[in-house]
Structures are given as structure tokens and as C-alpha cells.
Image (tube, coloured by chain):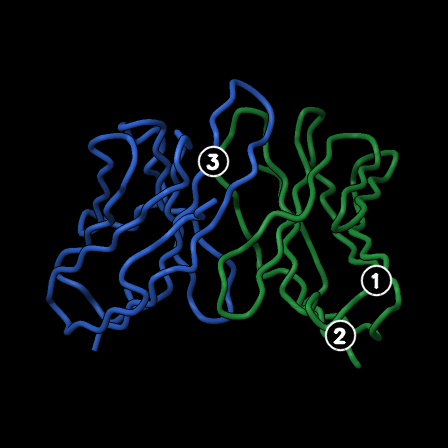
Chain colours: A green, B blue
Amino acid sequence: DAKTTQPNSMESNEEEPVHLPCNHSTISGTDYIHWYRQLPSQGPEYVIHGLTSNVNNRMASLAIAEDRKSSTLILHRATLRDAAVYYCMVTTSGTYKYIFGTGTRLKVLA
Amino acid sequence: GAGVSQTPSNKVTEKGKYVELRCDPISGHTALYWYRQSLGQGPEFLIYFQGTGAADDSGLPNDRFFAVRPEGSVSTLKIQRTERGDSAVYLCASSFHTSGGPNEQFFGPGTRLTVL
């Protein structure tokens, strides 16, 4: 599976948008991009996934670069409950295991 | 509905002892995964079950680690002759299985294992 690179940490003010970047320059044509987040003392939880087109759901939006070598998770209005470690992962179709990196620790300031 | 549950939530054992960690997946999920997470690191894949069989056990670190899922539902991760380096949070996840495309994995809260 393709390796991903994320910043170690980011900060955001409450109620402002947050853009979390992820680089995956070795992604292949059928690889999916996944985002999970892990709140303190909890297991990871699904946020969003995509293949080529931008995706929106109730939690976030995923913007995928045209060449697919990078993507951005967008939280439209950060709340204190969004403080977590955010993991970006790439999987090959048919592969069911995730390779987590160290993720981006998001701190939300009141 | 009920999520993935794991028991115990905490386990303290002594070096050399045997431990069993249990995972109850979401009803109807045919795929089950075990990961372990050390402090400050992301989860590390251990093993994946599709039904009763281990479809991928490439992440098990050595032969002291073994996992079973005899009826295709509950799974037990077994660690023999525990070492201090086995101390970590052991996470279980489950998902539906489809023939292609990604499946959302639902994670349990984990079992914190401490080996003294």
C-alpha cells in the first residue's frame, strides 16, 4: 500500500474551518484514500473515504488533488470535540487492512 | 445498536504469563481485525479474519501471538509467555465484507495490556 505523509500536529480555533493535508505520492489508480480519527482513550472512528472525486458527508469533506498525489480533509467548523489524531491511509482495492502512520494531532482552541 | 466490545478493558499481568483478550464484533459483520497500539503510535495491524478463517496474519509479531474466531463471531487474541514489550492497547475492529472497495471498520475501545 502507498505510504502517506501528514504533519505531526496542527492547531485551529473553534468554529473555524480546518484543512488537514495528506501526501500520498505513490498512490496507484485503484487505491482508495481513507481518513479515520482517534479521540483520546477511544478506538479510531471512520471519517470519510474517496477514490477520485471530492466527497462530502455529515462529518467532513475530502478534497482529492487532480493527480491524486495528495488530499485534504476539511472540517468546516471545528469544535472542541474534533480534537483528535487524524489518520490518512491509502489502501489497494481488495486489501482490507489499514496501515496507520502517526497521524496529525489536531488541537482546537476555545 | 451495539458497537464492538472488548474485554477486559484493562489487563495487568506478569512477564511470562498467558493472556487472552476477547472481542465481540458488531452482529452481522463477517470481517474482524486485530491491531495493537503503542503509546504515541498509530495502530499496527496484527490479523484479519474473514468468517472463521484468518485471511491475513502477516502482522502477528511472532509465534507467541495467536488468534481464533471459531464460530465466525467472537474472537480471542492469545498471547503466550508475555514480555514487557507486549504492553500496548489491543484494538479490535469489524466490518462487512464486500467483494471490492473499502469497508468502514468499526473499532472497539481496546484492551490496555500491561506486562510487569
- Is label 3 on the same chain as label 2? no
- Where in the figure is residue A8, as x and y percent of width and height? 68, 67
Can you identify the residue that label 2 sits on?
A108
Q: Look at label 3 and name its amino acid.
A: Ser
Residue corresponding to mark 1 = A18
Left or right? Give the position of A106 relative to A36. right
Q: Specify few, some or many for label 1: CA neighbours under 10 Å numbering under 14, 14-19, or 20 or more.
A: many
Give the structural element (helix, strand or loop) at label 2.
strand
Left or right for B92, reference B75: right
Among numbered discs 2 and 1, the one appearing first in the sequence: 1
Q: Which residue corresponds to the image point at 24% horizontal and 36% vertical from the top-left?
A: B69
* Residue B9 tag number: none
Question: Which residue is rendered at x = 72% and y = 74% of the image?
Answer: A107
Q: Are marks 2 and 1 in contact (CB under 8 Å)?
A: yes
Q: Which residue is mark 3?
A: B95
The secondary element bearing badge 1 is classed as strand
Measuring 49% from the left and 58% from the top, which residue is drawn there?
A43
Amino acid on which the number 1 mark rests in the picture: Val
Chain letter behind tag 3: B
